[in-house]
Image (cartoon, helix red, strand yellow):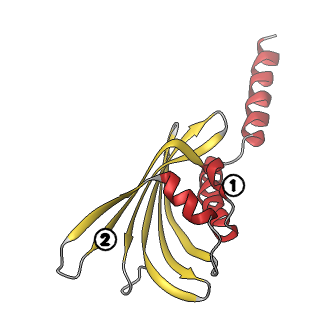
C-alpha cells in the first residue's frame, strides 16, 4: 500500500508539473500581449494585462543633463493607445531577464520604439508583474528613453 501511495504521489506530481505552463513563458506572454495590444490599438486586450492599480513611470534625461521622473496615469496611456492614430505604435522588445518569486515577477527588456516605420526612441523597460487568479498582471512599468546609444 505504501509503494502504491508513493507511486500515486509521484505520478500526480509529474502530471501536474506538465499540465502547468512554464511560469517564465507565462510572464513573457503577458509582457508580449501588452505590445501586441499597442500595435493593434486594442484597449480591451491592453486592459487584460494591466492590474487595476498599476503604475507607469519613465526616467527621462533632459538637455541640461538632469533626469526627471514622469508618472503617467494608466487610463491616459490606454486612451492614447485606443485613440485612432495614423502610424502603428510598434515597440520592439528583447527580453533580457525574468525573475520570479512566488506571485511576483520582474522582467528587464531593451526596446526600440517606432511610429510606423520611423524610429522614435529606445531604452530599457522594467516590468513588475503579480500572479493573480486570472494570470500574470502588470503592476508596474518603468522605462528609460533616449534617441541614441540604444541598448542591445
Horizontal and vertical percent position of residue 97 = 48, 61
- In this rendered view, identify the residue nearer to me: 76 or 20: 76
Graded by Cα atoms within 10 Å as few (under 14), some (14 to 19) or many (20 or more), the crowding at tag 2 reads some
Question: What residue is at 24 percent from the left and 77 percent from the top?
Answer: 62
Identify the residue at the far top of this view. 1
Q: Secondary structure at mark 1?
A: helix
* Quarter of the figure with the N terminus: top right
Q: Nearer the viewer, residue 68 or 104?
A: 68
Q: Residue at x 80, y 30 (%)?
A: 11
Are the two marked residues, 2 and 1, in contact with CB atoms closer than 8 angstroms? no
The residue lying at 47 percent from left, 83 percent from top is: 120
Q: Earlier in the sequence, mark 2 or mark 1?
A: 1
In the displayed structure, 66 sits above or below 24; it is below
Secondary structure beneath label 2: strand
Q: Is residue 48 visible?
A: yes
Residue at 62%, 66% in the rendered image: 83
- Viewport quadrant of the C terminus: bottom left
In the rendering, at what x and y percent does residue 149 appear? 36, 86
Disc number placed over residue 60 in the picture, else none: 2
Residue under label 1: 45
| Residue 117: quadrant of the picture | bottom right
Q: Residues within 10 Å of mark 1 (few under 14, many from 20)?
A: some
Amino acid at each position: 500500500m505504501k509503494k502504491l501511495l508513493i507511486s500515486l504521489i509521484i505520478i500526480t506530481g509529474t502530471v501536474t508539473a506538465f499540465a502547468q505552463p512554464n511560469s517564465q513563458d507565462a510572464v513573457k506572454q503577458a509582457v508580449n500581449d501588452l505590445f501586441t495590444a499597442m500595435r493593434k490599438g486594442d484597449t480591451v486586450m491592453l486592459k487584460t494585462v494591466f492590474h487595476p492599480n498599476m503604475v507607469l513611470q519613465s526616467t527621462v534625461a533632459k538637455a541640461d543633463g538632469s533626469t526627471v521622473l514622469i508618472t503617467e496615469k494608466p487610463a491616459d496611456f490606454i486612451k492614447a493607445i485606443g485613440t485612432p492614430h495614423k502610424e502603428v505604435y510598434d515597440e520592439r522588445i528583447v527580453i533580457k531577464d525574468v525573475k520570479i518569486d512566488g506571485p511576483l515577477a520582474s522582467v528587464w527588456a531593451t526596446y526600440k520604439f517606432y511610429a510606423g516605420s520611423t524610429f522614435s526612441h529606445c531604452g530599457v523597460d522594467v516590468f513588475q508583474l503579480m500572479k493573480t487568479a486570472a494570470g500574470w498582471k502588470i503592476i508596474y512599468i518603468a522605462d528609460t528613453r533616449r534617441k541614441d546609444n540604444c541598448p542591445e
